[in-house]
Image (cartoon, rainbow, N blue to C red):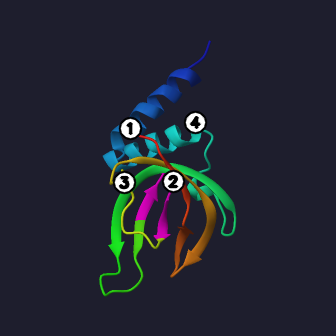
Amino acid sequence: MRDGPSPRREGRLRRIWGRLVRSNDELVADELARAVTATGAQTIAGVRVRDRVVLQGDISSVTIGPRDGGPPRLEASLTDGTGSVALVWMGRRTIAGLEVGRRILVRGTLTVHGGRQVIFNPYYELLT
């Protein structure tokens, strides 16, 4: 006869306790990471600089720049629950349908520019 809870019950209790003590932002990030991984896309945390990547996630910000008359540029931040990467489209000020909260799939080469991960002029598909 065994003493204490069964391993199966202990695992379930640990998951429940983990959800109770975690922040809502952490739970949302975990859910997004699971959804992205289920599609077969790579995770931002799992890619390296100079890799050709296929990423999927949600747009968390969109910025148009520069306002000083320089060449047009549209920047968006892609978040997949494991990290974020900047998407930069040179020569554009708008992309129809690209807005905060939109799910998107991108393909491109991951680089580092100004100390942050960036994909310049990525191929993109608006998903939801």
Judging from the image, what secondary structure is the residue with disc 1 in?
helix
Q: Earlier in the sequence, mark 1 or mark 3?
A: 1
The tag on residue 31 is none
Q: Earlier in the sequence, mark 3 or mark 4?
A: 4
State yes or no: residue 8 in magenta: no
The tag on residue 82 is 2
- Please name whichever residue, 13 or 49, is drawn nearer the observer in this view of the structure: 49
Neighbor class of circle 1 (other Cα within 10 Å; few <14, some 14-19, many 20+) is few
Q: Earlier in the sequence, mark 1 or mark 2?
A: 1
Q: Are marks 4 and 1 in contact (CB under 8 Å)?
A: no
Name the mark nearer the viewer: 4 or 1.
4
In terms of image quadrants, where is residue 108?
Answer: bottom right
CA distance for labels 3 and 4: 27 Å
Residue holding disc 3: 96
CA distance for labels 4 and 1: 21 Å
Q: Is residue 43 above or below residue 84?
A: above
Residue holding disc 1: 19
Q: Residue at x 36, y 57 (%)?
A: 60
User: Can I make out residue 5 in this image?
Assistant: no
Q: Earlier in the sequence, mark 2 or mark 3?
A: 2
Judging from the image, what secondary structure is the residue with disc 4 in?
helix
Judging from the image, what secondary structure is the residue with disc 3 in?
loop
The tag on residue 38 is 4
- Segment tinted magenta in the rendering: 76-89
Neighbor class of circle 3 (other Cα within 10 Å; few <14, some 14-19, many 20+) is few
Residue 18 percent coordinates (x, y): 42, 39
Q: Earlier in the sequence, mark 4 or mark 1?
A: 1
Residue 26 percent coordinates (x, y): 39, 48
